[in-house]
Amino acid sequence: MDINNSVALVTGANRGLGRAFAKRLLERGARKVYATARRPETVDLPGVEVLPLDIADAASLRAAAEAAPDVSLLVNNAGIQTGTDLVTGSLDAVRHELETNVLGHLGMIREFAPTLARNGGGAIVNVLSAMSWFGVRGANAYHLTKAAAWAMTNGVRLELAEQGTLVTAVHLGLADTDMSADWPVVKIAPSDLADAALDGVEAGSAEVLADQWSRDVKSRLTLRPEEFNAAMDRALAALTAA
């Protein structure tokens, strides 16, 4: 897929990674970029077409699909992190993360899959995380949702192959956004993450490992669980000590 002259829709485009995606899409020649947010008045990027969208609300999803019938590239970026553990944390918070990070993305795909088919197949980018593959105390609900979103991405890729829709999973460690502001570690710039993802789409890639952290984590998946956990403990200790 060629980004130039594409019509893209980006969720959570008012800040962070979503805003970076929308900006780089414009700079790389997209014909139109729908920038969506729960509070559309917070989108401040010139040149985009702003739409209100709450990905956890079915009516909002349908309205967005009706308002954007020309989309050829869907960027599923919007998400939340509540800092919740699975056993002792709020079950309502766990459900909220699942509704947003998994079912919200799936809802977008279900609504826009017919649109993409009518427009030649197009592509879907699901912004995931290296935490698709490992947990950490204080964020295991997020780990659960990203692991589920990875599985969902792999499933819809198979289901949409016949209509010619590319589904690209994008994994990263930490990006320099509000969500990671309290982590004094090396982070990927949002614009670099967006470029890596869009390069992957243009190359027809099913998966993009956007930084060294995500590549290192995935390379450890063949280890036994106890070996994997020990390796991740060492890596996290080194990361926070750097």
Image (cartoon, rainbow, N blue to C red):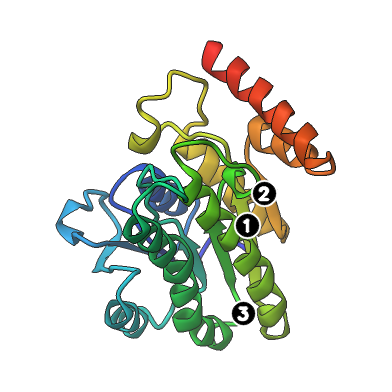
Badge 2: few (under 14), some or many (20 or more) residues near its Cα, within 10 Å?
many
Q: Quadrant of residue 47?
A: bottom left
Q: Is residue 169 above or below residue 231?
A: below
x, y percent for residue 80 = 37, 51
The residue at the point 54 percent across, 88 percent down is 118
The residue at the point 48 percent across, 61 percent down is 75
Using the rendered image of the protein, determine whether residue 180 is visible from the camera's viewpoint: yes
* Mark 1, residue position: 169
* Mark 3, residue position: 121
In whole angstroms, how far apart are the C-alphas of marks 1 and 2?
6 Å
Horizontal side of 104 relative to 45 (left or right) equals: right
Looking at the rendered structure, which numbered label has been put on residue 208? 2
x, y percent for residue 110 = 49, 81
x, y percent for residue 34 = 34, 65
Residues tagged 1 and 2 counted as in contact (Cβ below 8 A): yes
Of the numbered discs 3 and 2, the one sitting upstream in the chain is 3
Horizontal side of 182 relative to 128 (left or right) equals: left
In whole angstroms, how far apart are the C-alphas of marks 3 and 2?
20 Å
The residue at the point 63 percent across, 57 percent down is 169
